[in-house]
Amino acid sequence: MSLLRRGRSVAGQILALQLIVLVVVVLGSLALAYTDARRDADRAATDQVLAVALTVAESPVIDQAVRSADPSAVLQPYAESVRVDTGTDFVVIMNRDGIRWTHPDPANIGKVFLGSIDRAQRGEAQTERYAGTLGPSIRAVVPVLRDGRIIALVSVGVTVQKINTGLLSTLPQLALAAVAVLGIGLIGALLINRRLRRQTHGMGEREITRMYEYYDTVLRSVREGLILLDRSGQIQLINSEGARLLGVDPTVTGSPIDGVGLPESLVSALVGSEPMTDEIHLVDARMLVFNRRAARTSLRLPARKAAP
């Protein structure tokens, strides 16, 4: 039975956190992309209906219809032709008071237009989102001006349902992009997890912490002095007894061995590459016996020299 109860490894926990962050970022980006696409679609629809309404308002057909006994008979076929050709959902031509002369549903001809026409009645073009007879729509209402006089009003609109249908067609592309980003992120996370798992031997954070505490306690409590150097000659560990015997501060970890005030002969012996057995050196008033061995680890860290 293992001395340490194993839990989820550090590598596994980091992988899980990476995946959570990755999914949140991708979903957030997808939502922002959809919101941006929706805003662009609304803006494009507004520009479209306004342009169509202004064009219809310039048509001489309206002048002829206004002077006729039955404007609807002239304007209804024309309005429906424009609606079909432009891909809009309604083209409504009405008198100055908002009484419809045209409508996609002939039953609504002669009824009052549903929506705001105040600005158009003052000679201004206007756009709005309003729920009319065909449901919520983005619409434009413009005046038909002749010699500075308003002779009719034109409203062109696109339903929100149609805009939503168009947006749905873009979702597969957005989803494909999201899946691609998610896949690339997942591959990167798995590669990082593989390297981290190899370096930590699949241990959990409690195991690593307790192992460090055990090793640190053992190394610092042995009666012999111990000093670990890396390949560049920097002190990676020195226990309390080693610091006492060498007469150095216990906080010299990370310092180069030749910068802590030791005799040059001892420094040369400590950074050597050959094993050293029972070699005597004088440090201050102490005669110390040194042994040096290469320390190798299964964690594939740089080789360290140990003495004494």
Image (tube, grey):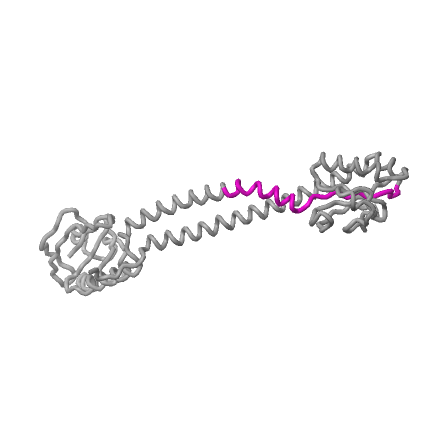
Q: Say which residue appears at 40% left-offset and 46% top-offset.
A: 186
For the C terminus, the quadrant is bottom left
Give the farthest residue toward the left: 278
Residues 247 and 9: in front is 9
Q: Is residue 219 visible?
A: yes
Residues 68 and 49: in front is 68
Residues 168 and 41: in front is 168
162 with respect to 83 (left or right): left
For the N terminus, the quadrant is bottom left
Q: Position of residue 51 (x, y in %)?
A: 74, 39
79 with respect to 266 (left or right): right
Residue range of the region highlighted in magenta in the rendering = 148-175
Q: Say which residue appears at 19% left-offset and 65% top-offset.
A: 221
State yes or no: residue 203 in magenta.
no
Q: Position of residue 292 (x, y in %)?
A: 14, 53
72 with respect to 289 (left or right): right
